[in-house]
Image (cartoon, rainbow, N blue to C red):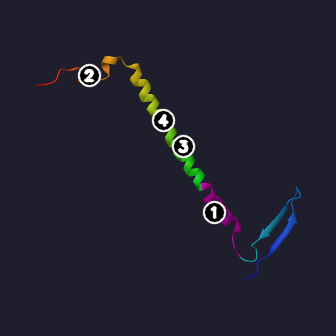
Amino acid sequence: MSTQSIGTSGANGAPVNFSGLGSGLNTSSIISALMAVERAPVNRLTHEQEVLQAEQQQLQGFQSSSRSRPPNSRCRRCMKPPRR
């Protein structure tokens, strides 16, 4: 199997290569797939961080609402005398 590589210079002087033209490989899709694999751990951690931040906000909301109630309203069941 032979591969062709055509090299030219781009507008900024950087080389532009078109490899895989003769082999029939879709190099751009291969590169895109590899980049997606590389991004997967970052995406997973970003999602996990968002979930944890949402949970933290909920807990802070519960904490602030429990502090804003009068002390006697927190546990009415505890204030009743025990049944006999």
Residue 79 position (above or below residue 15): above
Indicate the amino acid at tag 4: Gln
Which residue shows up at 60% across the image and 51% down it? 42
Indicate the amino acid at tag 2: Arg
Q: Measure how far apart labels 2 and 3 are at the Cα level.
A: 37 Å
Indicate the amino acid at tag 3: Gln
Label 2 vs 4, first from the N-terminus: 4
Estimate how packed mark 2 is, as few (under 14), some (14 to 19) or many (20 or more) residues with alpha carbons within 10 Å. Answer: few
Circle number at residue 11: none
- Residue 21 in the image: state x and y as whole percent: 76, 73
Q: Secondary structure at mark 1?
A: helix
- Residue 19 in the image: state x and y as whole percent: 77, 71
Where are the magenta residues, as a range?
24-39
Q: Measure how far apart labels 1 and 4 are at the Cα level.
A: 34 Å
- Residue 31 in the image: state x and y as whole percent: 68, 64
Circle number at residue 76: 2
Residue at the extreme bottom of the image, as rendered: 1
Estimate how packed mark 1 is, as few (under 14), some (14 to 19) or many (20 or more) residues with alpha carbons within 10 Å. Answer: few
Label 1 vs 4, first from the N-terminus: 1
Label 3 vs 1, first from the N-terminus: 1
Circle number at residue 56: 4
Circle number at residue 49: 3
Q: Nearer the viewer, mark 2 or mark 1?
A: 2
- Left or right relative to 13: residue 4: left
Name the quadrant containing residue 22. bottom right
The residue indicated by pointer 1 is 33
- Tell me, yes or no, whether the highlighted magenta stretch contains residue 29: yes
- Tell me, yes or no, whether the highlighted magenta stretch contains residue 22: no
Label 2 vs 3, first from the N-terminus: 3
Which quadrant does the C terminus fall into?
top left
Which residue shows up at 73% across the image and 82% down it? 1
Q: Measure how far apart labels 3 and 1 are at the Cα level.
A: 24 Å
